[in-house]
Image: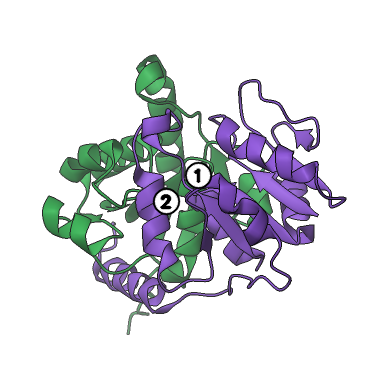
């Protein structure tokens, strides 16, 4: 099963339609959280706002998760150790207010297991990978440094009377 | 001889709106080790999913519904009165700025960790938080350098 999620706020027709077209060519189920707005997705199993427990359950069961480059989704892929393909939203296509998702994707492209899909035409090839790499759990060096820095500040803060 | 009282544990109010902000805050929990933490977010059910307790739910608001500020402020004020935190920490967004501002009035030290989603510049709420944050961080070194924020690392 493939889990497609574009977050709960904005629609993302470019990605949803590409996944719908791909789903028509395969027997693999695609569960989709397609955000707001109308979009063609006859070949997908669309869901509305998923309660956290159900979101977690679908995420855990997915062979691969396909998503916008939202931080919540990226951290979920780490937490549930699933392979992740991200398609950044582009401001120029009216998909977001700015290009912060592209910046996130560029940063993740180097040095992590996240697969970045810049053109939806590349999706079928990425989905055909037989053994996609899952995101590792646990903090990397940068995460550990953030924790240490915060700990230091918290330890130095005076206690109120 | 008088008994020496053991120093109490540091109290923390950790608040973030639901979604990516909350998940990033959850990734920072190891930094709260040994502290008494009260969590707050905007989406019912989230704290339970992450085993974050005690937790309070506060209403969400954004620039498009600023009229909700008094209600959000009242609820965050309630959480502050109950928790009496030494530290208030948030990753965003506007309810987080509100929590830092009120927390500072209450005499707490305040921490803003801007969302890692802001890879090109500080978020708008992050810019607002600057005035009320004792520790003002970006999760990107180049954003930190340009904005004058601090940088330790990132949750990714």
Residue at coordinates 45% horizontally, 45% vertically from top-left?
B16
User: N-terminal of the two: label 2 or label 1?
Assistant: 2
Tell whether B74 sits left or right of B140: right
- Disc 2 to disc 1, how far (Cα)? 7 Å
Which residue is most to the right? A27
**CB atoms at circles 2 and 1 under 8 Å apart?**
yes
Residue A20 position within the rendered picture, expressed as x and y whole percent measured from the top left: 72, 38
Q: Secondary structure at mark 1?
A: strand
Which quadrant of the figure has residue B141? bottom left
Quadrant containing the C terminus of chain B in the rendered view:
bottom left
Residue at coordinates 33% horizontally, 55% vertically from top-left?
B87
Considering only vertical position in the picture, is A45 above or below A72? above
Q: Which residue is mark 1?
A: B40
Which residue is most to the top? B67
The colour with which the image depicts chain A is: purple
Q: Which residue is mark 2?
A: B13
Tell whether A57 sits left or right of A102: right
Residue B124 position within the rendered picture, expressed as x and y whole percent measured from the top left: 27, 36
Front in this rendered view, residue A145 or A73: A73
């Amino acid at each position: 099963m493939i889990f497609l999620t574009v977050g709960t706020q904005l629609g993302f027709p470019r990605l949803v339609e590409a996944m719908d077209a791909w789903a028509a060519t395969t027997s693999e189920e695609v569960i989709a959280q397609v955000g707001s707005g109308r979009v063609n997705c006859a070949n997908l199993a669309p869901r509305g706002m998923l309660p956290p427990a159900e979101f977690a359950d679908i995420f855990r069961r997915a062979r691969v998760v396909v998503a916008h480059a939202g931080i919540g989704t990226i951290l979920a892929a780490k937490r549930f150790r699933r392979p992740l393909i991200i398609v950044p939203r582009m401001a120029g296509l009216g998909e977001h207010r700015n290009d912060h998702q592209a910046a996130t994707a560029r940063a993740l492209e180097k040095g992590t297991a996240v697969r970045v899909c810049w053109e939806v035409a590349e999706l079928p090839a990425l989905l055909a990978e037989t053994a996609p790499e899952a995101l590792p759990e646990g903090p990397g060096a940068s995460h550990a440094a953030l924790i240490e820095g915060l700990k230091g500040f918290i330890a130095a803060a005076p206690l109120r009377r | 001889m008088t008994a020496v009282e053991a120093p109490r544990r540091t109290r923390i109010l950790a608040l973030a709106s639901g979604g990516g902000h909350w998940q990033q805050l959850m990734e920072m929990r190891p930094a709260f080790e040994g502290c008494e933490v009260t969590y707050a977010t905007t989406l019912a059910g989230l704290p339970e999913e992450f085993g974050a307790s005690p937790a309070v739910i506060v209403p969400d608001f954004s620039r498009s519904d600023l009229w909700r500020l008094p209600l959000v402020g009242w609820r965050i004020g309630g959480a502050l009165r109950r928790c009496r935190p030494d530290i208030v920490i948030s990753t965003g967004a506007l309810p987080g700025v509100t929590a830092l501002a009120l927390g500072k009035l209450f005499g707490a030290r305040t921490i803003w960790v801007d969302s890692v989603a802001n890879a090109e510049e500080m978020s708008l709420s992050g810019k607002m938080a600057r005035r009320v944050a004792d520790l003002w961080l970006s999760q990107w070194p180049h954003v930190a350098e340009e904005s004058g924020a601090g940088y330790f690392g990132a949750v990714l």
